[in-house]
Image (cartoon, rainbow, N blue to C red):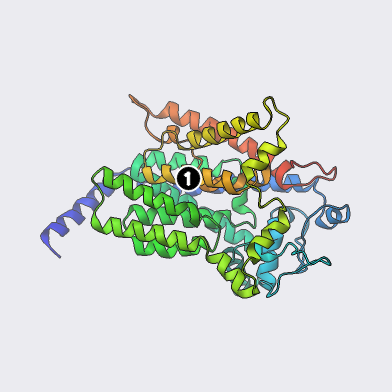
Amino acid sequence: MSAVTTVGTASGRAARSAEPPLVRRWWVWPLALYIVTRLVNGVMFAMASRSAISLEEFVGLGGRHFGTDAGTAPPGYLTSVTRWDAQWYWEIAAHGYPSDLPTDASGNVEQNPWAFFPLYPYLVRAVMFVTRLDFPIAASVVSLTCGAAAMLLIYRVVKRQYGHLGGVLAGLAMTTFMCAPVFQMAYAESLALALLLAYFWCVLEGRYVAAGFVLLMLALTRGVAAPLAPVMLLYAALLWRRGRLARSDAVGLLSLAAWSGALAFAWFVIVGAVTGRWDAYVLTQKAWNPELTVIPVVRFMQRNSDVPGGQVGAAVIALAWAAFLIWFLTKGQQEPLLALWTGMYVAYLLAVTDWNWSNVRYYVLALPVLWPLVGRLRGERNPMPRVIVAGAVALVGVAMQWWYIRYCVTVSRELVQVP
């Protein structure tokens, strides 16, 4: 080891030892916030489940809800966190994917497991095999663990630009986001968020090979590889314009852009290869939404053509809403890579997903952390006012979490639910 390296290592250790104990033990902050909010959400799930209709009753009353034949969770909390898409993940964890697409009497493809990406259910399946736990508990463990990892990662990613307090406030915002209850449901959001943040960490650290491996796992978790391709290209162009694009970075970022583009079609190809139908994934998605061939923005305009101005008025509303979302979620963001991702991802969601309450949880991956509160304000001498505002926003978020659990996740016996 050279003398320079030795001195550098020693000075780094000295700097860390000079930090306050609670800064050195940085992991305590994001984990403490995460655990507290998950306990609060757990109470909310338990309370909401008291008035929830059972899956069997819901289906019997004509509700369109898939229930796996692998079993049902016991009434209460576990039933609440294994509803809706969680039932499909349960089916995959228990039985895998069908080799043939199921069809009805008319030959139309029915809803089936191929609509869901494999990494999350197979990870739960592995936990079930090792621990012998049933799906509801194993899935909760996987989701909660991945969510905890995501909170640690967002702290590390944000701390690079905003310091310790910024990392803590970013974690607070994420764990109190309205849809953060999905972090303890049998859904893939927590795993996808952890992988996405790990990917960004690798890119920011210049570890492009590791980033490519993480991206592969992400592409097998959620269909978010497509918007990452233009993000990598724009990020490389921005670094080049600022004179900060080294040759190794150019090769790494352009390779990741190409890799993202290829992975965007990976699941389509896998589904087609296994089922023997090249359009199997599209047909499966159309089983959920027959209007899949109509662009979501166009559907929004058609459904709201009764507003003043007709479809032109609806188009103005749609554009205004898209512009507001991108502005609101990126305002104050000082890290260009994250800002590019959020803007591109929001545009991607608006372009390819239906505009309804069921899909609001997708915005967890847009990193909705209110960046102006994360960064230091101009002329700020004491961060306490900013911390107080962030705390107030967090309390509002927790209140909205109850609304989300009670009216979006849960179906009451009166069949009251947000469409």
The residue type indicated by label 1 comes to Met
Q: Quadrant of residue 309?
A: top right
Residue at (38% x, 46% y) in the render: 337
Q: Residue furthest right?
A: 61
Q: Quadrant of residue 210?
A: bottom left
Q: Residues within 10 Å of mark 1 (few under 14, many from 20)?
A: some
**Residue 23 point in image, percent of width and height:** 36, 44
Q: Answer above or below: position of 203 versus 405.
A: below
**Residue 253 point in image, percent of width and height:** 34, 56
Instruction: Classify mark 1: helix, strand or loop.
Output: helix
- Residue situated in front as seen by the camera: 79 or 211: 211
Q: Is residue 59 visible?
A: yes
Q: Which residue carries the number 1 mark? A: 344
Residue at (46% x, 59% y) in the render: 261
Q: Is residue 22 visible?
A: no
- Residue situated in front as seen by the camera: 312 or 386: 312
Residue at (76% x, 53% y) in the render: 76
Q: Answer above or below: position of 118 versus 274.
A: above
Q: Is residue 133 left or right of residue 191?
A: right
Q: Answer above or below: position of 32 versus 144.
A: above
**Residue 278 point in image, percent of width and height:** 61, 69
